[in-house]
Image (cartoon, coloured by chain):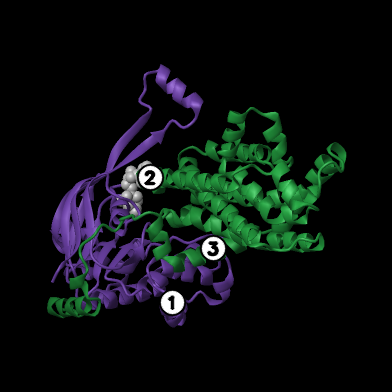
Chain colours: A purple, B green
Amino acid sequence: MGTSIKVDHATKVFTKRYHKTFKQMTVAKMRKQKISDTFNAVDDVTFEIQQGESVGLMGLNGSGKSTLLKLINGTMRPDEGSVLTRGRIAGLIATGAGFHPQLTGRENVYLNAAILGMNEKETARKFDEIVDFADIGDFLDTPVGNYSSGMYSRLGFAVAVHVDSDIFLADEVLAVGDKPFKRKCMEKMEEVKASGVTLVYVSHAAASVARMCERVIVLEKGKLGFDGAALDGIRYVKYDDELPVDGKTDESALANDDAMLGADI
Amino acid sequence: MTEAAQATGAVALADRHHLDAIPLSSPAANRGLLEVFRRRYVLRLLVKREVQGRYEGSFLGFLWSYINPLSQFFIYWFFMGQLLSRGRFENYPVHMFAGLIIVHFFTETFGAGTRSLVGNKGLIAKMSVPREMFPVATMLVSLWHVAPQILILVGVCLLEGWRPDVVGMLAMVAAILIAMILGTGLALLFSTANVFFRDFGSFVSIMNNYIRFGVPMLYPFSTIANGLPQWAVHLYLCNPVSIAVILFQRAFWLGTTKDPVKQAAATLPDHLAMWTIIGIAISAVVLLIAQRVFLKYENKVPERL
Ligand SMILES: Nc1ncnc2c1ncn2[C@@H]1O[C@H](COP(=O)(O)OP(=O)(O)OP(=O)(O)O)[C@@H](O)[C@H]1O
Ligand SMILES: [Mg+2]
């Protein structure tokens, strides 16, 4: 089976602070400060993911996980190195979809699906399924700007997961949903995973990573800190106290719902 | 689930989606404006949303796209036509309204296009969508709003005895084409600039005010031709918006005058066909340069929004 994602010495440079106004610029110049102050949010990262693999992406806040996902889904381009992917990419980045706040839920579903590569017929065919899954009631024709954050992420997840994708990126999808929805998400993602889609799963909840993924990649201040078996990775980031006691990832872990679903709260 | 089962899944998926036939490629690959037209469906949805969204939250909604140009028309007609040059120029209101339509189309494209990237940050910061899409969509929305204005103009012209002619219709198409190409080019350029420094948004508003006076809309071209040295007249005509305005007057106003042949000689520039070609060429060059600049800087756009 082929390579699905190939990240080769990718680096993404961000600017920490911009001296934006003319006044700030001159003041900074006079004090001989740097006009801009850059750092590598993703720093020389290299790895390869095979089609059908599911990989957990872990790391502390600000370690560059969402940025790395943006490089993979093509929102951003690496400043150095390369990121290559194969096939259609869907997913959610930084807790929430790219929605337009003034558009209604319905319009956003169509626009979002179109950007993810679905055509009108395909969207129309899956529309009811998407709405059923999101289960946001009568709010479908309300502008999403007025949604609660849970509703917003439900709709985003529903669209993304119904795209017939080859790569699925899930960035803290469970962070704001309520418990029934979290369970539904997990089940849906397992389904997606079983269908052979490459899954990159970002979460701070160790138990859910242990359940979803065989492999974990850990970022530390943008650098690749660890790449290997899931449980070792979880131990590496010292989240292993959250794991169910026996460390198993099969059905017995399902019983331990709180460790898996609750830890995101 | 066992790893074997998952591996089977991946094989099935690879077969179903013909993944073997798809090469590994950069997810951020950008083919520029071509990509926009390859993804027409997304473009259509964006245009639809913009048409609904441009006068969002306003009670009169779509009517504003009539009220804006009509109110401008009455101000100019009253002050310039009635007070300043009373009756000295044949069919002044038609002459001005023809110009106004093109100028309004251009300034809307330029102004709204410049704000288009910042205005769509929710989408741009999280999804991989060709970012040229947004300025192009605003241009198409402005174009959509032009249609009813042309209908009004045609109605007035018919009452004044105007009949469509082939050259006139070609002139109309060329005028719209120039405004489309130049407007898109400048919108591309300034929408990127506006992401880095919001000053450019204000700057474009000022430019749009000057454009109204820099083209023969409020006054006939003959004022320029008779009042300025030759080189300045040529410079004036190098502004593609001027050409577009003159072409629109050729298409509509000229046919409403008593003696079109005489009027054409008196008010329109010589060699209008040549100037049309020059106008299209300059617009196309601006668009090409804009596309180059856009490709160079758009990489930094999502993080600076
Ligand atoms: N547009 C931006 N401009 C400048 N810096 C940015 C920008 N976006 C993110 N950063 C910085 O890049 C770093 C990595 O951010 P990122 O969002 O990738 O972290 P993360 O690993 O997803 O964190 P979290 O666990 O909190 O979601 C952070 O230090 C952040 O401040
Ligand atoms: Mg993040």
Q: Secondary structure at mark 3?
A: helix
Badge 1 vs badge 2, beta-carbon distance below 8 Å: no
On the picture, is A232 further left or further right than A158? Answer: left
Task: From the top left corner, tell me how far across and down residue B14 is, in percent.
Answer: 20, 75
**Residue at image point 27% right, 72% down:** A256
Nearer to the camera, A150 or A75: A75
Q: Which residue is mark 2?
A: B292
Discs 3, 2: same chain: yes
Query: Residue A206 got which mark?
Result: none
On the picture, is A16 further left or further right than B92? Answer: left
Nearer to the camera, B88 or A122: B88
Nearer to the camera, B305 or B193: B193
Quarter location, residue A181: bottom left
Task: From the top left corner, tell me how far across and down residue B292 is, in percent.
Answer: 38, 45
Q: Chain of mark 3?
A: B
- Identity of the amino acid at label 3? Val
